[in-house]
Amino acid sequence: MIRRVAQALLPLLVLLPPALPQVHTMTEGAHRMELQLDRLDGSDWHVIDPGLVLNQGDRVRFRFRTNFDGFLYVLNQSTSGKYEQLFPREETGQDNRIVASKEYQVPATSTVFRVAGPPGHEIVYWLVTPARLTNAPPRPEPPPASKSKPLTLIPRCDDAILRSRGDCIDTSAGPKLVPRGAELPQNIAGAVSDSRELLFMRQKDTAVISSPQPLAGPVIYEFHLAHR
């Protein structure tokens, strides 16, 4: 389970590519989204591989950008099976509207994720839509007991991927399509159109999700966050 902890007033280490190349990448494809995963190391944030297997006590956050205006909803399903809404945060009254080329932090407050709970894969659901939903998804409710089962996918290190620091990389982690027939959180299941045309790429430690055609409606994808 990922628990929120208050974030101290820490200096932010900006680890973005040079300005011109970054602007160029955001113009590629009709609709494009970029995700980075940061981990707190001492007093500094460092971008990490999306497939890095995290340790108990690690503190992490997401950074998200698009090349189009729209609206964003983010939900987390912990390894214990519980759901939590990460964006927008109800306690801040923050709108879920997103603006092209602007970077958004998830969670959308001065809190971060603290990795805890049974080893496995947290599933973070990203619902992105170019237009406001007629019926906005309500906050997630606890699922029935029969559906609130812990996730059992255990992280595995890929021995074929060599890292100078000996990092454990799980290639099944990171962003991906929602499997056909997968059970979605009830509050977003009815708002999703077909996401089969989404393309998933990697640019160094940045995960790129793009659509060759402008999005005609809402799409959803998963980000598997692996931890020991």
Image (tube, rainbow, N blue to C red):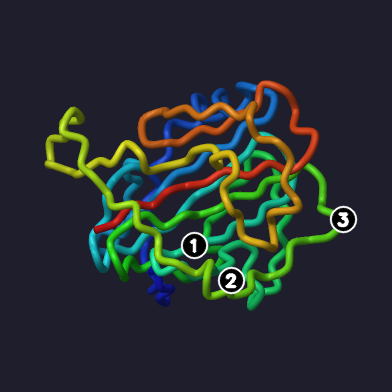
**Disc 2 to disc 3: CB gap under 8 Å:** no
For label 2, the residue is 143
Badge 2 density bin: few <14, some 14–19, many ≥20, Cα 10 Å: some
Inspect the image, locate mark 3, and give the three-letter code of the amino acid beneath it: Thr
Q: Nearer the viewer, residue 108 or 222?
A: 222
Q: Secondary structure at mark 3?
A: loop
In the rendered image, which quarter is residue 41 located in? bottom left
**Cα–Cα span, label 2 and label 3:** 24 Å
Q: Position of residue 170 (x, y in %)?
A: 28, 41
Q: Secondary structure at mark 2?
A: loop
- Using residue 176 as the reference point, say whether residue 130 is left or right of it: right
Q: Is residue 154 above or below residue 109?
A: above
Sequence-earlier tag: 2 or 1: 1
Judging by the rendered image, the residue that carries numbered circle 3 is 134
Label 1 belongs to which residue? 77
In this view, 93 is above or below 26: below
